[in-house]
Image (cartoon, rainbow, N blue to C red):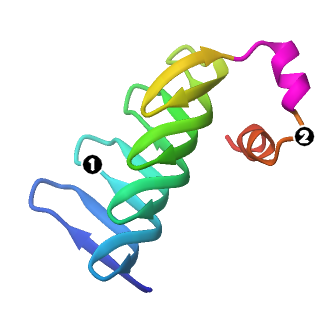
Amino acid sequence: MKKGVYTWLDGRKYEGEFKDNFKYGFGLYEWGDGRKYEGNYKFDKKHGFGKYSWVDGRKYIGYWENGKQHGYGKYYLKDGTVKIGVWVSGKRIKWLNQNELTEIKEDEKIQNILKEN
């Protein structure tokens, strides 16, 4: 893999790893309006673990598949409230309650999410 920077005329910028001209591996993608994603890519799509933040303060830290939120994730609301949930193909299917979190606390993916801010 190669590392590099690609900048678009509209202000978007990607700095990270490439493979065969695809975003592939770890990278930071920033939009002109202030949104950003920092995490793993596979063939130009968010894939694996990553952090996405919006300008208004919302943030998602968790897992991605084929460009969409998929699996466990931690979601920060504008008011600072933090929730842990499960996403499938970009759609949140449920928020996890404390009992559910306790049951799965040994899962490596949950541990990764809980330690990140």
Closer to the camera, 72 or 117?
72
Give the residue pinned by disc 1: 31
The magenta stretch spans residue 48:
no
Q: Is residue 86 above or below residue 81?
A: below
Q: What residue type is disc 2 on?
A: Glu
Q: What residue is rendered at 42% in x and 61% in y?
A: 28
Q: Main secondary structure of the magenta part?
A: helix
Q: Residue at x 42, y 64 (%)?
A: 42
Q: Is residue 105 above or below residue 49?
A: above
Q: Quadrant of the C terminus?
A: top right
Q: Nearer the viewer, residue 85 or 39?
A: 85
Single out the mark in the foreground, 1 or 2.
2
Circle 2 sits on which residue?
A: 106
Q: Which mark is residue 107?
A: none
Specify whether 50 is left or right of 83.
Answer: left
How far across and down, in percent of the image, does residue 33 sit?
Answer: 24, 40
Q: Residues within 10 Å of mark 2 (few under 14, many from 20)?
A: few
Q: Residue at x 52, y 38 (%)?
A: 70
Q: Which contiguous range is marked in magenta?
A: 96-104
The answer to which image quadrant residue 14 occupies is: bottom left
Q: Report the front residue among 92 and 81.
A: 92
Name the kind of residue labelled 1 in the image.
Answer: Trp
- Find numbered disc 1 in the image and state the secondary structure of the residue it sits on: loop
Question: In the rendering, at what x and y percent does residue 54 appear?
Answer: 39, 33
Are dots 1 and 2 in contact, CB under 8 Å?
Answer: no
- Outermost residue to the left: 9
Q: Give the mark, 1 or 2, whose residue is nearer the N terminus.
A: 1
Q: Nearer the viewer, residue 111 or 11?
A: 111
Circle 1: is it few (<14), some (14-19), or many (20+) Cα within 10 Å?
some
